[in-house]
Image (tube, rainbow, N blue to C red):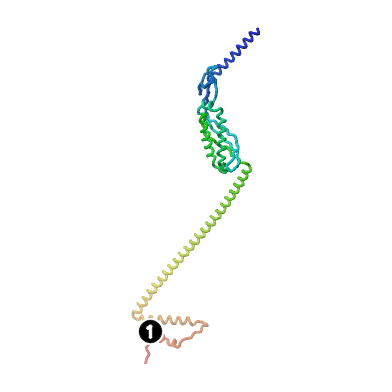
Amino acid sequence: MDENYIIIGFWTIITIYLALKIFRCIRIIPAQDVLIVERLGKYSRTLRAGFHLLVPFVDRDAYYLSLKEQAIDVQPQICITHDNVQVKVDGVLYIKVIDPVRAAYGIQDYKFASIQLAQTTMRSIIGTMELDKTIGGEKDMINSTIVAAVDQASGPWGIKVNRYEILNIVPPKSVLDAMEKEKKAQISKRSQILLSEGERDSRINRSLGLKEEAINKSEGEKQRRINSAEGKASEIESIAQASAKGIEAVASSIAEQEGGSAVKLQITKAFIQNFLNLAKENTEILIPADVMNLPNLIANLTGTKSKTKD
């Protein structure tokens, strides 16, 4: 009876084992995944997306790989710059399997190898650069150099390196404090320069305004004087023309009959009026003797001699 239980148990175990083996021979591969199959220890074929059957006890699924682009963290590492400053650098490496067979048999662990190569290249590049360039705008150059180096080395591994991105470059705290002080000093200097430039521009603008104002005033004064001179010239010209016309009229009148008598009358009248203007109150004047002989005086003024009776 015991022997029967043993035989039944044995065959049950065998049956379960065979069922599991047969079940494991059924493979459904998702998209963007591949399965490397070995037959009797040798590479047999590469199974891609779809339904597949393996030969029990003969075929073995050796490697299961993904064809998707993979982001691999590159752990922080200490790098020494050209000016002997230690910085801690980390990043992300983006790779993709393009040849599953090479990725499976070309190297034991392509991810680990890619990380190590990226770190080594990063140390070499940063060792040739100053701290300012490392922290400044040279990240793109570092990234492209690492991508070129890793991609060239990973060609036999069936790996394509798409890009590398530096996440952080962290200098020591003492260096950060010094950089912060330098930045504050630069900001203060720039602020003072801007203030002085603003004050300078303000003074220049004020001086230009005063200059323009002075020019405008001088131009206005110049134009006023020109206008005044032109007005006076016009006035003098008008007076001269009027005087000339008056003289012409007087000359014309003198040429006529009785014109001489009219001239004598005017001269006499003007003489008397001027004489009366001189003889004001509290004014002492000396009168020539011939002034009392008015006819002779008028005759002398008019250029004629009065006739005396015998």
Q: Amino acid at mark 1?
A: Gly
Q: Position of residue 37 (x, y in %)?
A: 53, 21
Examine the rendering and report whether any part of residue 40 can be seen. yes
Looking at this view, name the residue that lies furthest to the bottom.
310
Crowding around mark 1 (Cα neighbors within 10 Å: few <14, some 14 to 19, many 20+) is few
Image point (48%, 86%), residue name: 286
State left or right for residue 210 relative to residue 4: left
Q: Position of residue 137 (x, y in %)?
A: 54, 42
| Quadrant hosting residue 2 | top right
Figure quadrant of the N terminus: top right
Q: Position of residue 83 (x, y in %)?
A: 58, 43
Image point (37%, 88%), residue name: 307
The residue lying toward the viewer, choosing from 293 and 27, is 27
User: Residue beneath label 1, please?
Assistant: 303
Looking at the image, residue 239 lies above or below residue 179:
below
Looking at the image, residue 220 lies above or below residue 263:
above
Q: Secondary structure at mark 1?
A: loop
| Quadrant hosting residue 243 | bottom left
